Image (cartoon, helix red, strand yellow):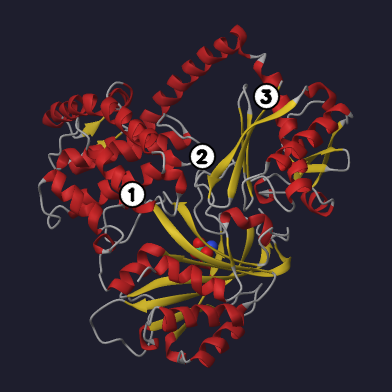
Amino acid sequence: MNVRDEYIKFFESKGHKQIPSSPIVPENDPTVLFNTAGMQPLIPYLMGQSHPYGKRLCDFQKCVRLTDLDGIGDTSHHTFFEMLGNWSLGDYFKKESIGYSFEFLTEVLHIPVDKLAVTVFEGDEKIPRDEVAAARWKELGISEDRIAYLGRSDNFWIAGDSGPCGGDTEIFYFRSDDDTPSKFDPKDDRWVEIWNNVFMEFYQDENGNITELSQKNVDTGMGLERIVAVIEGVDDNYKTSIWKDVIELISDIADLPYEGNEKAMRIIADHIRTATFIIADPAGIKPSNTDRGYILRRLIRRAIRYAKNLNIDITGDFAEKIARLIIKKYSMYYPELNNEEVITSVLRGEQIKFSKTLEKGLREFDKLVKDSNYVDKTVAFKLYDTYGFPIELTVEEASSRGMEVDTLGFEEKFKEHQEKSRTASQGMFKGGLLGHSEIETKYHTATHLLNAALKRVIGDTYQMGSNITTERLRFDFPCDHKLTDEEKKEVEDLVNKWIEEDYPVTVKEMSKDDAVKSGAECRFIEKYPDIVTVYSIGDFSSELCGGPHVEHTGVLGHFKIKKEESSSAGVRRIKAILE
Ligand code: SER
């Protein structure tokens, strides 16, 4: 059974619209490295903004969670995973949501009711116990013994420290050949959580104050890997149809069985899959020593390290082969993967760099281990700087040899080094790069005009992503069709008219509440400080934005769309220039 397709079909039959998976790198939200949950791209809509696809949505969303990156290698954790989600944006609430989940699990996936148990929010001084959810579960046939009431740490969900949130009810499945106990014990790890239904009716600010949202939402999330393992009756996610062929390929390449080599094979499979998706993301991340690029580097280098453990030829094409299989498996769902040459060449490039120095770095360890049980800061930094060992990899290598690493000392040296390179790059800036920011500023304002023009021409759309270089702007927006020549012309004409009419670009500081009330486009408002800036142009554009912008539109020149193409399912991309 294809759980993903069945899930979407089921929720469509209940009046939900499928929305495209957003990119893994949340564009326009520099505070978050990667999307960690299906709800993340939907935050503005959970806060009350109207969604172009309506009030009932469903999707499968690419997520990357790095909290236990070092723990990857067990049966059930992944750095990349897909989350099946359905949402009610101020439409149905607890009763229907629980009903849909129950129906999908028992009637579509045919899971026996006897294998299910649930947790419900027990309430606290601020929010009462969730009797409505509990009563609904009982009505559907879940006995009192199979309902556990738990507190905030278990049955309350929020992404990070502030944002839309609420109590939740989690559904568990008894994954064991043992007889299913009649009483549910959430601490018994034979019960695995398969689905989380969050009733998002509150907003929590940075100080922990809770207020009611303007609408009551439902946000549910079910990890695809885990539910597939349940349906296929295996206790190791890597033995499911999702991973089986990838593991077989790695086993072929290494000429070793999976049994006995599970940890290394799982790490290679997991990390290459995540790297493939990160490279394919429209953000165009490349391995580097900062932020997302560093995570990508860590993943690829750790996969190479484990490939070496299996005696795989790390100067060969093992990573590319695995990536090709991943691309083949997923590209029908994620068209951005149809970029095999770029993906494999980025992997190859990183592999060439690291395979050369890995051997030497490991020799350094061998030398050390003879007369010390400690990796001091100088060696840790040399491993990083000369041999390309991410510090986390050094720590892992050290601990497998019973050694400690002076990570604090490493950080000091790392900062000194950064300081030096920053000074160097500032010098470069003085040498002539400064002039570029003026054109980038123009593109920034042109992006707001384009956003406003698209809303007029194709209707209720919005900025899903944007990227500016000195050469052009790039703009992604949800739209279910390729723009016609007439539509493109209309958009261009409108933007050029607004440029000619030379509107002043005004900026106002206001509280977040006032920004929302003013009707400004407020994506990711929860990530902004309490006082935000709203840039407005005429009566057609008003967006929460950090700037910078030009003072009046007349200086932008002539706006021209150079390209209009698909970015991913249901998302179009425009590249445009000012000339
Ligand atoms: N946001 C919740 C989660 O990630 C439900 O989707 O578990």
Q: Quadrant of the N terminus?
A: bottom left
Q: Amino acid at mark 2?
A: Pro
Q: Earlier in the sequence, mark 1 or mark 2?
A: 2
Crowd rating for badge 2 (residues with CA inside 10 Å; few <14, some 14–19, many 20+): many
Q: Secondary structure at mark 3?
A: helix
Q: Quadrant of the C terminus?
A: top right
**Closer to us: 97 or 301:** 97
**Residues at circles 3 and 2 in contact by the CB criterion of under 8 Å:** no
- Residue under label 1, please give it: 328
Q: Amino acid at mark 3?
A: Glu
Q: Mark 1 or 3, which is nearer the eye?
A: 1
Residue 237 picture quarter: bottom left
| Position in image of residue 30 (x %, y %) | 58, 39
Q: Mark 3 or 2, which is nearer the eye?
A: 2
Residue 546 picture quarter: top right
- Residue under label 3, please give it: 440
Q: CA distance from mark 3 to mark 2?
A: 19 Å
Q: Secondary structure at mark 2?
A: loop
Count of labels in the image: 3
Q: What residue is shown at x 35% (from left), y 37% (from top)?
A: 298
- Residue under label 2, please give it: 282
Q: Is residue 398 above or below residue 554?
A: below
**Closer to us: 289 or 530:** 289
In the figure, is residue 334 to the left or right of 255? right
Crowd rating for badge 1 (residues with CA inside 10 Å; few <14, some 14–19, many 20+): few
| Position in image of residue 559 (x %, y %) | 74, 28
